[in-house]
Image (cartoon, rainbow, N blue to C red):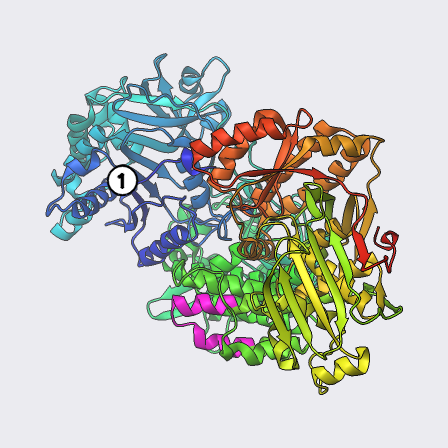
């Protein structure tokens, strides 16, 4: 949900119990800031705050957190003491972690949900904390005035995208409620409110009559859901109480001052004092001991005058995370309500070898499941690395188990069980402890889903093994039963030391019982304070990136359209980049496929770019540093594995600072382009060249070509998109103001040299650039696009008129094969960067005339693929649409399949009689006066494609389908539909290459919009030519007048209009008579 609809927090605080884990939670908050999980404008202050006392209560934790927030805001504002003034304009969010949770060692806040967020900037596990942050920031708190929001994290909360809370004229304190059933309310709190929405009382576990009193017309009751908002005035008054005994004991200042501890509830000690139906006497009596009554008296005086209102959110839902295992499993396997911003999935952030073995209604979160792991409906596996064969029945929760546990689990009857591996810290000793409970246990009378007596009978365990003799029998329960082995004097303990409790065989029962008795054991009650939350979070992180590495292999080797960029960002943020880089190196070097290897190298470039953190310069830039030459040479020679090894070795020298990282990323993209070139050059096998008569010495062979207009599908022809996704482009060959604007001519000359001449705009123009090549060394820069004559040099090499490199000098080659050299002239009437396919069409014209002048013959299909080859050798990396558009006459659609070798197939689009003339009458070219920079656009598009950004993948599908729709519209002669396809195509181009519409061009298009069916910038966009399909025919003069006004308004210069026509063919002319008929090129 967009940043425009988001609360902007001044401070975000997460409170936690004391116990040394605050730094781990602080790290978690910072990680969310880094990966964009706190929105586009994260809070300036992120604070994990430890409660001063172990049992402070939600009220005391709120007061302490408010003090900490005010202190930090005061310091930032330049105060030397805490000032409540800083609360005036602040938006503060306090999240309470609350008590320990039996089913997640990191508490309810960090309970992971079966959710993936493909649109997130960085890939990460989604915890309940993240869900609540999303709900609060993007839904519940949007539009609220300055103040303090307090939210518990002990529930799953679902809120509609527009909760409809009215903040006009708001004062005081507001509680948030969700509608629930009266049956559910019997074990929870409900609000009693009047018709104006003012709270009269809070009823907790009330009688049927009390709950009925709270019901609305539809029979539902407003449930207390753990969310409350204090206006800045109310927050100031609450903060003021922190210096008044006994409330000073709620804060860290009280702890440091030696005040005795006190426990306060947020709802029943702070919020309740503002309920209109509660008297002071009732309120004070409700307090427990004298200190709480005294605290309530202070709170009554401070807050009583503030109105307490309620907002009950229609369509919202609330699910308290209870200590019932079956409830917890249900909450992780059932889809959340339609109002939720989350979408549950069966496998979230997991690698599963055999997903078909996971039944619907099961859930796998942050796991690596290797081999045959069967999971029944109604069961959950989280944070586990397991190896099959394993069979897990219904009603199970497995958590925190490593691969070493798999052997013990094989053949074990797993049904209605909770099996967890814990990180435990006993002073300086860290160890792993396994716990086993029943899904249906009630924590009192049963264990492993059976009465204690049955359990004792089955295992031989006695009451005295579990509980001290002095403990009253009525107090003996699962919570304080010392069931779980922690340490053994002689042997290492493992999962088997709790699994035997399930169904010990007669042979091993006595041995296992003796081993169990000899171990030092702990109860749940004793274990909970010793849980090492930092170690557990670290283990989850390590497993997340381990399965992430499997995902990298799966996506790349399976050629999947999943984006790895979010995972790359997370790896950098969390310090796992080296592991992911190693996996990418391995995939690139062992895939045996240039296309897969190229994508792997592109992913490495992304990681290096992420590591630079937006510093060090632009991602696009030169990539020819000599230090990388050895690696590049290996790749060029076809030794991919060796090249990847050399790249990795060189990479290590460039990791120390952002500028070097960016330059290294550029070189990895350069290496990737080498492999793309090799993949594209597989198209050479579709170039067939025959022999024909050698023209006489001095006889010119001239080729004149039309320009091309791309009507839809462009970018889908660009490598690697064209052979990884498949492409389709509708092209039009057009005359510009009645002539073919692009051409070349070649003749043989007596001197054994190459004369390369670039003329002005016509064959009769003056020579603009003239170059003479007499040695092979003069051709060495053919692969540098900006070198003089590079395209013509590449044409000689790609047509194999000249062999390069070769032991034979250029002079010898020319004399032996052709009895002399060649002179080449080229021209184009079109301005540089026109977007009309000039360079590729010119390459086709040069190669066509050169083949013919050298006594060779090539078909149009061969020429199309030969130009692809040439542009890869030239390193400009273009697609195939330009040469299809300019070398094949008329209207056509070119297609390529998602495969290598890359082959382009062209189909003529047959239009109704007279429709070609209709197109000619309605089609106009407008030169925008802006020069486009397609090279930079191309680099960005290829980078985004390799990152498989979802928007780019979807757009690639849309480009191809729009091309087919456009072809059909042309066949039907439907000008209006063709115009719609043009407009859609322009939107698709902008999606593919953001920034391709200059502001001035956008204004020009806006001015033309009422007069056209559709319009689009030619080629990659960014400037050059705009082509428009006018509503009325022959509108050159009318549009000229409109654009003349626009030119003045927008400061545009150099706008020209051209009439375009669809020619029948491109001409090949001899000096006196045609040497090859035009029909050969149709």
User: Mark 1 highlights which residue?
Assistant: 62
Residue 327 among those drawn in magenta: no
Q: Is residue 513 visible?
A: no
Q: Residues within 10 Å of mark 1 (few under 14, many from 20)?
A: many
Q: Position of residue 1064 (x, y in %)?
A: 81, 44
- On screen, residue 946 versus residue 891, left or right, reads left
In the displayed structure, does residue 570 sit left or right of residue 781?
Answer: left
User: Residue 1039, how many percent across, how many down?
Assistant: 58, 29
163 or 540, nearer to the observer: 163
> Against 689, is 356 above or below?
above
Observer-nearest of 726 and 414: 726
* Secondary structure type for disc 1: helix
Picture quadrant of residue 282? top left
**Residue 149 falls in which quadrant of the image?**
top left
Q: Percent x, y for residue 152?
A: 37, 39
| Residue 208 position (above or below residue 415) | above
Give the magenta part as a residue range: 647-666
């Amino acid at each position: 949900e967009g940043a425009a609809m988001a609360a902007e927090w001044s401070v975000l605080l997460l409170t936690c119990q004391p116990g040394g884990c605050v730094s781990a939670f602080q790290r978690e908050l910072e990680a969310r800031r880094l990966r964009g999980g706190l929105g586009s404008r994260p809070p300036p202050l992120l604070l994990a705050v430890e409660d001063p006392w172990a049992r402070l209560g939600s009220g005391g934790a709120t007061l302490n957190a408010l003090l900490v927030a005010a202190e930090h805001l005061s310091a930032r504002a330049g105060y030397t003491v805490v000032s409540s003034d800083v609360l005036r304009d602040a938006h503060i969010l306090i999240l309470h972690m609350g008590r320990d949770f039996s089913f997640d060692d990191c508490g309810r806040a960090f309970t992971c949900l079966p959710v993936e967020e493909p649109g997130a900037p960085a890939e990460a596990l989604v915890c309940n904390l993240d869900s609540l942050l999303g709900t609060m920031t993007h839904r519940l708190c949007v539009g609220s005035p300055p103040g303090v929001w307090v939210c518990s994290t002990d529930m799953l909360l679902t809120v509609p995208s527009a909760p409809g809370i009215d903040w006009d004229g708001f004062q005081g304190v507001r509680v948030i409620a969700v509608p629930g059933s009266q049956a559910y309310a019997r074990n929870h709190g409900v609000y009693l409110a009047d018709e104006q929405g003012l709270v009269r009382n809070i009823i907790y576990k009330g009688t049927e009559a009390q709950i009925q009193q709270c019901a609305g017309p539809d029979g539902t009751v407003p449930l207390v859901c753990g969310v409350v908002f204090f206006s800045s005035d109310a927050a100031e008054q609450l903060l003021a109480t922190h210096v008044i005994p006994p409330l000073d004991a709620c804060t860290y200042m009280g702890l440091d001052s030696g005040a005795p501890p006190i426990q306060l509830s947020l709802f029943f000690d702070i919020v309740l004092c503002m309920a209109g139906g509660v008297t002071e006497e009732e309120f004070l009596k409700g307090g427990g001991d004298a200190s709480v009554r005294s605290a309530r008296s202070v709170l009554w005086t401070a807050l009583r005058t503030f109105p307490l209102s309620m907002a009950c959110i229609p369509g919202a839902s609330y699910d308290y995370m209870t200590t019932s295992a079956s409830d917890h499993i249900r909450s992780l396997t059932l889809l959340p309500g339609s109002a939720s911003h989350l979408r549950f999935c069966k496998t979230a952030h997991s690698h599963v070898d055999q997903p078909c073995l996971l039944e619907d209604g099961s859930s796998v979160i942050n796991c690596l499941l290797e081999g045959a792991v069967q999971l029944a409906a109604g069961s959950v596996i989280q944070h586990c690395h397991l190896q099959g064969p394993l069979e897990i029945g219904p009603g199970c929760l497995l958590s925190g188990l490593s691969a070493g546990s798999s052997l013990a689990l094989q053949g074990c009857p797993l049904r209605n069980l909770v099996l967890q591996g814990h990180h435990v810290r006993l002073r300086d000793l860290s160890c792993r402890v396994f716990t086993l409970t029943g899904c249906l246990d009630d924590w009192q009378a049963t264990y492993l889903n059976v009465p204690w007596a049955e359990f004792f009978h089955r295992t031989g365990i006695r009451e005295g093994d579990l509980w001290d003799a002095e403990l009253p029998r009525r107090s003996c329960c699962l919570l304080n039963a010392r069931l779980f082995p922690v340490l053994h004097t002689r042997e290492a303990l493992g999962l088997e030391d709790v699994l035997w409790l399930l169904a010990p065989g007669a042979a091993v029962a006595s041995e296992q019982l003796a081993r169990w008795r000899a171990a030092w054991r702990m109860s749940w009650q004793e274990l909970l304070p010793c849980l090492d939350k930092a170690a557990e979070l670290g283990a989850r992180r390590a497993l997340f990136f381990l399965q992430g590495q499997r995902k990298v292999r799966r996506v790349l080797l399976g050629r999947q359209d999943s984006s790895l960029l979010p995972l790359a960002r997370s790896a950098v943020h969390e310090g796992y980049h080296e592991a992911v880089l190693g996996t990418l190196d391995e995939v690139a070097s062992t895939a045996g496929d240039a296309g897969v290897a190229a994508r792997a190298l592109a992913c490495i470039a992304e990681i290096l770019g992420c590591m630079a953190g937006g510093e060090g310069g632009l991602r696009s830039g030169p990539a020819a540093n000599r230090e990388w030459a050895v690696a590049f040479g290996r790749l060029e020679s076809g030794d991919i594995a060796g090249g990847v090894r050399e790249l990795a070795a060189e990479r290590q020298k460039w990791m120390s600072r952002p500028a070097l990282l960016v330059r290294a990323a550029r070189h990895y993209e350069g290496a990737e382009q080498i492999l793309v070139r090799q993949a594209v050059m597989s198209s050479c096998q579709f170039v067939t060249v025959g022999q024909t008569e050698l023209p006489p010495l001095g006889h010119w062979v001239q080729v004149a070509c039309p320009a091309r207009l791309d009507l839809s599908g462009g970018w889908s022809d660009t490598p690697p998109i064209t052979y990884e996704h498949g492409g389709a482009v509708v092209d039009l060959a057009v005359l510009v103001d009645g002539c073919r604007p692009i051409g070349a001519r070649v003749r043989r000359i007596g001197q054994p040299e190459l004369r390369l001449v670039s003329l002005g705009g016509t064959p009769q123009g003056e020579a603009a650039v003239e170059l003479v090549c007499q040695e092979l060394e003069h051709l060495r820069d053919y692969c540098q696009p900006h070198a003089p004559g590079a395209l013509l040099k590449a044409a000689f090499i790609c047509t194999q008129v000249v062999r390069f490199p070769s032991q034979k000098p250029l002079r010898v080659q020319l004399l032996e094969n052709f009895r002399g050299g060649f002179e080449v002239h080229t021209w184009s009437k079109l301005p540089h960067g026109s977007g009309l396919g000039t360079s590729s069409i010119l390459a086709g014209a040069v190669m066509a005339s050169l083949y013919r002048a050298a006594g060779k013959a090539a078909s149009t299909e061969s020429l199309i693929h030969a130009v692809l080859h040439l542009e890869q050798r030239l390193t400009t990396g273009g697609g195939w649409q330009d040469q299809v558009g300019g070398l094949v006459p008329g209207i056509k659609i070119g297609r390529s399949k998602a495969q290598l070798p890359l082959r382009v197939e062209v189909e003529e689009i047959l239009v109704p009689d007279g429709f070609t003339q209709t197109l000619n009458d309605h089609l106009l070219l407008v030169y925008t006066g802006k020069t486009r920079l397609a090279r930079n656009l191309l680099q960005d598009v290829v980078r985004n494609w390799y990152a498989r950004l979802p928007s780019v993948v979807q757009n690639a599908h849309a480009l191809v389908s729009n091309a087919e729709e456009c072809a059909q519209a042309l066949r039907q002669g439907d000008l209006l539909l063709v115009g719609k396809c043009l407009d859609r195509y322009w939107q698709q181009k902008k999606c593919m290459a953001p920034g391709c519409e200059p502001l001035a061009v956008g204004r020009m298009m806006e001015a033309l919009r009422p007069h056209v069916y559709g319009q689009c910038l030619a080629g990659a966009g960014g400037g050059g030519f705009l082509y428009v399909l006018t509503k009325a025919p022959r509108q050159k003069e009318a549009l000229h007048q409109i654009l003349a006004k626009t030119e003045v308004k927008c400061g545009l210069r150099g706008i020209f209009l051209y009439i375009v026509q669809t020619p029948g063919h491109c001409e090949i002319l001899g000096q006196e008579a045609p040497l090859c008929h035009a029909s050969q090129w149709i």
